[in-house]
Image (cartoon, grey):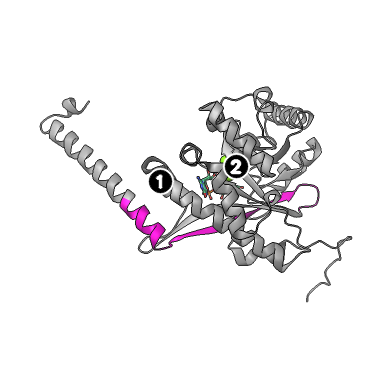
Amino acid sequence: LAKGNGKGGWQRYQSDLHTAMMQRLEMRTALHEAIEEEQFVLQFQPIVELVDQRITGVEALVRWQHPAKGLLGPFHFVEAAEESGAIVEIGAWVLVEALRQFTQWKTENPETTLRYVSVNVSARQFRGTDFAAQVRAALTETGARAEWLLLEITESLVLKDADKVLDELKALRAMGVRIAIDDFGTGYSSLSYLRQMPVDVLKLDKSFIDDILHSRQQHALVDAIVTLSHNLDLAVVAEGIEEAGQRAALDAMGCQYGQGYHFARPLWPGDIPALAVQPEPYPVRQQAVV
Ligand code: C2E
Ligand code: MG
Ligand code: MG
Ligand code: MG
């Protein structure tokens, strides 16, 4: 307790509180300026078919190109953006920018293996204005097709505010937009509960994947989730695959999709089109370079 901190503890406590409040205020202002100065940028991480590592989709991941601190990942600002409400504006930008970029890839190369772009949605975006209407407007503005969009939401969002969220999800699905549960396994929802929700894809959290090669129990658990998901007509994406052995194990379980550093890190938009080309029907062995 602050009181027990000896002489001046209380004052220090008060000034810490003040500092924290000032920092929050500064952060809010900074985030607001960042939106106006267009300092947010997107990277895209491939999502692949485990059987042949072909890119099937990309996840849009936001970064802050900070004028003084350099490129900042979401860890540095997403929580603060959620608390201050700035995430609503940032999220709206992410949605349009991801769809704009994806539409460009699809139009410039109709042969691309890319089928969808995945966009993270924060609970605040659902709670505010009519989210389904916002998505519809973003699709119209960018010329993107609804089938190209996969929205990633979290278990906690589905569990809270269930009725309002359910209506929004149904409206989105009726438009042809698909819904994924992100970080599945870190929350408290069950698969049978999720099946009653309008959800198409489960993204199995990295913490479930980490130990599958070293823990028989973890392997069995993931195997069971994959089987049950498929029986419930849910597609599964395994997150955070870092080793070839994990890819092989998940493929053997019948898990169809994966994402992780083993395949690719989040990349700048310019690097995506070259990866998303139809692979040769039979791998052509490269001539040895001497
Ligand atoms: P997420 O949606 O679960 O995204 C996956 C995160 O795991 C990304 O981190 C990605 O770089 C990282 N990752 C992917 N493969 C691997 C791997 O093999 N090993 C490891 N160690 N990490 C891997 P990132 O880009 O730092 O994003 C962190 C989180 O920030 C995201 O987790 C998501 O919850 C949030 N986020 C990112 N972009 C947005 C956004 O536009 N809006 C909202 N609301 N949240 C976002
Ligand atoms: Mg995600
Ligand atoms: Mg995730
Ligand atoms: Mg995750």
**Residue 139 appears left or right of 75:** right
Q: Nearer the viewer, residue 257 or 174?
A: 174
Q: Position of residue 152 (x, y in %)?
A: 60, 42
- The answer to the question of whether label 2 and label 1 lie on touching residues, with beta carbons closer than 8 A, is no
At 61% from the left and 36% from the top, the residue drawn is 169
Image: 66 above or below 233: below
Image: 239 above or below 282: above
In primary-sequence order, the first of circles 2 and 1 is: 1
Question: Quarter of the image holding residue 277?
Answer: bottom right
At 36% from the left and 43% from the top, the residue drawn is 84
Is the CB–ligand 1 distance for label 1 below 8 Å?
Answer: yes
Circle number at residue 152: 2
Report whether residue 186 is seen.
no
Q: Position of residue 201 (x, y in %)?
A: 69, 38
At 58% from the left and 56% from the top, the residue drawn is 98
**Residue 111 appears left or right of 150:** right
Assign a secondary structure to mark 1.
helix
Q: Which amino acid type is shown beneath numbered disc 1?
A: Ala
Q: Position of residue 11 (x, y in %)?
A: 13, 35
Report whether residue 33 is seen.
yes
**Residue 262 appears left or right of 37:** right
Give the magenta range: 29-53
Is the CB–ligand 2 distance for label 2 below 8 Å?
Answer: yes
- What is the spatial separation of the Cα atoms under label 2 and label 1, in whole angstroms? 18 Å
Image: 206 above or below 228: below
Q: Position of residue 240 (x, y in %)?
A: 62, 44
The residue labelled by disc 1 is 81
Q: Which amino acid type is shown beneath numbered disc 2?
A: Glu
Q: Is residue 15 magenta?
A: no
Q: Nearer the viewer, residue 267 or 24?
A: 24
